[in-house]
Amino acid sequence: MSILDIRAVPVTAPALEVPMMPTAVQAGFPSPALDFVHESINLQEHLVYDPPATFIARVSGDSMVGAGISHGDQLLIHKGTRPRDGDVVIAVLDGQFTVKRLRLTGARIRLEAANPEYPDIEIPELSELSIWGVAYMCLHGLR
């Protein structure tokens, strides 16, 4: 079962300007290399639209690999987004954090894994479930 590193912290760092190449990089045939970087972008403006309600959490486990979320990835999570059917959510089920796809069918609630080796979690009526936040971006390959 995928879980989150509980040391998730809000994104409150000052804006970070990162140099940007002036042209797109070819994914097909190579193009001549450029010697100059002419502009920059603010990563916080592009990745974090609501800093006080945005958190980053590291994923542990592989139950969401079919959704493109792997062990060690970092998820950007928004706590103010109302969860909808199909969203990848950070859920707290009976006191345990997990990342799963939320499925709402009538009165039924299911937390769906994205790996056939893991069962979906049907939420029993007496379970304590809260949706801590909605993941809106996955950062791969970060250490």
Image (cartoon, rainbow, N blue to C red):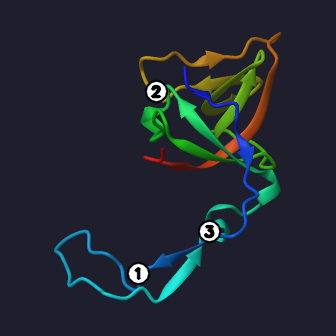
The residue nearer to you, when weighing 43 against 112, is 43
Residue 12's place in the image compared with 38, above or below, is above
* Contact flag, marks 1 and 2 (Cβ < 8 Å): no
Residue drawn at the location 63% of the way across and 30% of the way down:
4
Give the residue type at disc 2. Asp
Q: Quadrant of residue 79?
A: top right
SS state under label 1? loop
Measure how far apart labels 3 and 1 are at the Cα level: 16 Å
Q: What crowding class fits label 2: few (fewer than 14 Cα within 10 Å), some (14-19), or many (20 or more)? A: many
Q: Which mark is residue 21?
A: 1
Residue drawn at the location 26% of the way across and 69% of the way down:
27
Q: What crowding class fits label 1: few (fewer than 14 Cα within 10 Å), some (14-19), or many (20 or more)? A: some
The residue nearer to you, when weighing 124 against 105, is 124
Give the residue type at disc 1. Met
Q: Which mark's residue is nearer the viewer, 1 or 2?
A: 1
Q: What crowding class fits label 3: few (fewer than 14 Cα within 10 Å), some (14-19), or many (20 or more)? A: few
Q: Which mark is residue 62?
A: 2
Q: Quadrant of residue 120?
A: top right
* Contact flag, marks 3 and 2 (Cβ < 8 Å): no
Total labels: the figure holds 3
Q: Quadrant of residue 128?
A: top right
Residue drawn at the location 66% of the way across and 23% of the way down:
110
x, y percentage for residue 73? 50, 41
Reading the image, the residue beneath label 3 is 46
x, y percentage for residue 39? 51, 86
SS state under label 2? loop
